[in-house]
Image: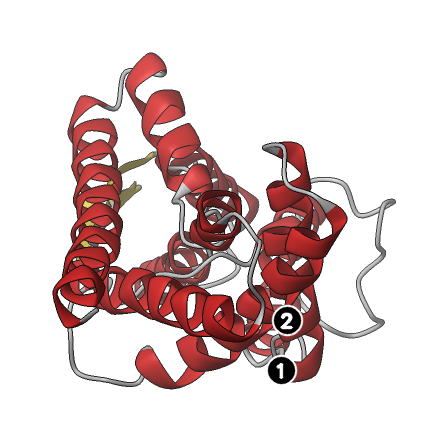
């Protein structure tokens, strides 16, 4: 027995899918969670089709009542914490023992409040993400064969680039130009530090800094979507990862050439 109208169920399912897709979830997980939401609210007959930029949902009920909705996804980022939280909340719609509903609150009200809470969660503070970016750059520098002195320089480069990315991402540019600018900045900072710290190998430092920009999760999701049969989503994610990679190569290569000409 459905406890909400078919339109309300559609809105809650679309909101669940939106948050998951904007947080970097694979399309098969998004479709599965949306189907669980509809089933938990009393509408087991539903079909969903998810792409990296849009969600299509169709729900049917008794009496040939049919609702079809579309949700456009404008931006995406990586937030695995939100994916985990939403998965727990949706699974609890079917198993109340894992997280009993508050007394007097329906499943739809519980889901609506939890989705709002998860969506409004603030990301990690800027100082922590900057430190993590510095550590990523530094340790990848060591991994590829850099010395401890180059590790220290890579830490500085990673910290500055992670800080700059917060402001570069606010520019009205696409992912290609965004990653090209970030890669060019990595080379520029590394070359500038090389003037004051002679005797270091810049290739390890630049590679360590570029690893911050590599779309690792996008490549993994593209492979997962393709292997699970979501060919449209897998191809789209794969092309997006390739374009980002080309942007990184173009930005770093252009800055290396400009520095050579300037020198």
Residue 137: x, y in percent? 59, 54
How busy is the neighbourhood of tag 2: few (under 14 within 10 Å), some, or many (20 plus)?
A: some
The answer to which quarter of the image holds residue 220 is: top left
Q: Nearer the viewer, residue 1 or 134?
A: 134
Tag shown at residue 126: 1
Identify the residue at image location x=25%, y=28%: 234
Residue 29 in view (yes/no): yes
- Which image quadrant: the C terminus? bottom left
Identify the residue at image location x=21%, y=58%: 251
Is label 1 in a helix, a strand or a loop?
helix
Is label 2 in a helix, a strand or a loop?
helix
The answer to which quarter of the image holds residue 130 is: bottom right
Identify the residue at image location x=37%, y=60%: 18
The residue wearing badge 2 is 129
Q: Nearer the viewer, residue 159 or 101?
A: 159
Q: Are marks 2 and 1 in contact (CB under 8 Å)?
A: yes
Display colour scheme: secondary structure
């Amino acid at each position: 027995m459905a406890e909400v109208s078919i339109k309300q169920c559609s809105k809650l399912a679309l909101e669940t899918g939106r948050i998951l897709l904007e947080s970097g979830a694979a399309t098969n997980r998004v479709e599965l969670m949306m189907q669980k939401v509809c089933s938990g609210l009393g509408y087991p007959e539903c079909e969903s089709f998810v792409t990296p930029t849009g969600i299509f949902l169709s729900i049917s009920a008794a009496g040939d009542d049919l609702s079809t909705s579309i949700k456009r996804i404008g931006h995406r980022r990586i937030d695995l914490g939100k994916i985990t939280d939403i998965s727990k909340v949706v699974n609890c719609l079917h198993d109340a023992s894992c997280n009993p509903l508050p007394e007097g609150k329906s499943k739809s009200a519980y889901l609506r409040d939890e989705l709002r809470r998860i969506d409004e969660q603030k990301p990690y503070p800027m100082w922590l993400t900057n430190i993590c970016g510095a550590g990523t750059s530094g340790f990848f520098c060591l991994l590829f064969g850099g010395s401890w002195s180059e590790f220290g320089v890579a830490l500085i480069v990673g910290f500055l680039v992670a800080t700059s990315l917060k402001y570069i991402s606010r520019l009205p540019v696409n992912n290609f130009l965004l990653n090209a600018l970030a890669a060019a900045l990595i080379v520029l900072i590394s070359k500038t530090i090389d003037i004051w710290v002679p005797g270091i190998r810049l290739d390890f430092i630049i590679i360590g800094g570029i690893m911050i920009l590599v779309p690792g999760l996008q490549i993994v999701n593209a492979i997962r979507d393709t292997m699970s049969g979501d060919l449209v989503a897998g191809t789209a994610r794969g092309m997006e990862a390739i374009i980002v990679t080309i942007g990184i190569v173009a930005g770093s290569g252009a800055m290396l050439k400009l520095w050579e000409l300037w020198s």
